Amino acid sequence: MRLINQSLKVRLIIFILAMIVFVAGCSQNLLQKNRVFILQPGDLLFQDLDCGPFCDAIEKVTTGYKGANLSHVGIVADDNHGNVVIIEALLTGVEVTPLDTFLDRSHDTNGQPKVLVGRLIPKYRYLIPFVLREALGLKGKLYDKVFDTNNDTYYCSELVYHCFLKANDGNPIFELHPMTFVDPETGRTFPAWKEYFEELKVPIPQGNLGINPGSISRSHILAIVHAYGAPSGWKKGNEIINKDY
């Protein structure tokens, strides 16, 4: 009888231990599924912005992270009230935009924002306070309609380039490249750009140095750490890319 009772006790202990492991495993999986990604000040939000022929032209001649079509970028900050905001350059100028407004501009086929998150690798994070101070100080500046990096106006990726340049004592963090406004399929200037510069009565800055969201997203000083949704052309799905950052 004692042997039988002892056997039952052993089985009961094994059963309880198994249930503890099972419950712990379920809890861990639940935590993983419910994990919420948290933006950090200084993160860069790369957006596949659906703005018609201009965005299509930008995406056709630039390459983003893993093939993603990226036509806009903004800098993550906070408003000192616990709210996440995005400092960005729009046609209306340099503005501070609520996160939800930014994310709600374009969506993938699953209804998710077509936005990737880039985060500075640790070596460069000391620059973030200086980047944010410079960016917030430019609020209200005009949009750079002629894409000239030497004037006091800013387009979206130029704003990022300039703020990091200033934060790093005038030493570039991101690279400038010759700009093109020519359709690679036809060898002619995109009609939208041709009309745009004609209305401004300025020459098309073909070949002048500039920068775009796609090239910044591929920078070696950034890690793509999260995807809110899937930008068109992107060769990876909607997931956390690198949770360790």
Image (cartoon, rainbow, N blue to C red):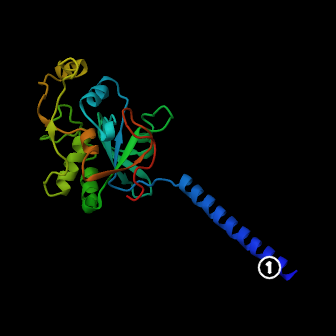
Q: Quadrant of residue 140?
A: top left
Q: Position of residue 66 (x, y in %)?
A: 32, 40
> Mark 1 falls on what kind of element?
helix
Q: Position of residue 208 (x, y in %)?
A: 11, 33
Q: Is residue 231 left or right of residue 6?
A: left
The vertical placement of 82 against 232, above or below, is below
| Residue found at the very far right of the displayed protein | 1
Position of the C terminus, as image quadrant, is bottom left
Q: Position of residue 7 (x, y in %)?
A: 79, 75
Q: Is residue 101 left or right of residue 153?
A: right
- Residue 119 or residue 54, whichever sits in front: 119
Q: Give the amino acid type for the residue marked by disc 1 in the picture.
A: Gln
Q: Position of residue 96 (x, y in %)?
A: 35, 46
The vertical placement of 219 against 186, above or below, is below
Q: Is residue 230 left or right of residue 221?
A: right
Q: From the image, tell me which residue sits under label 1.
A: 6
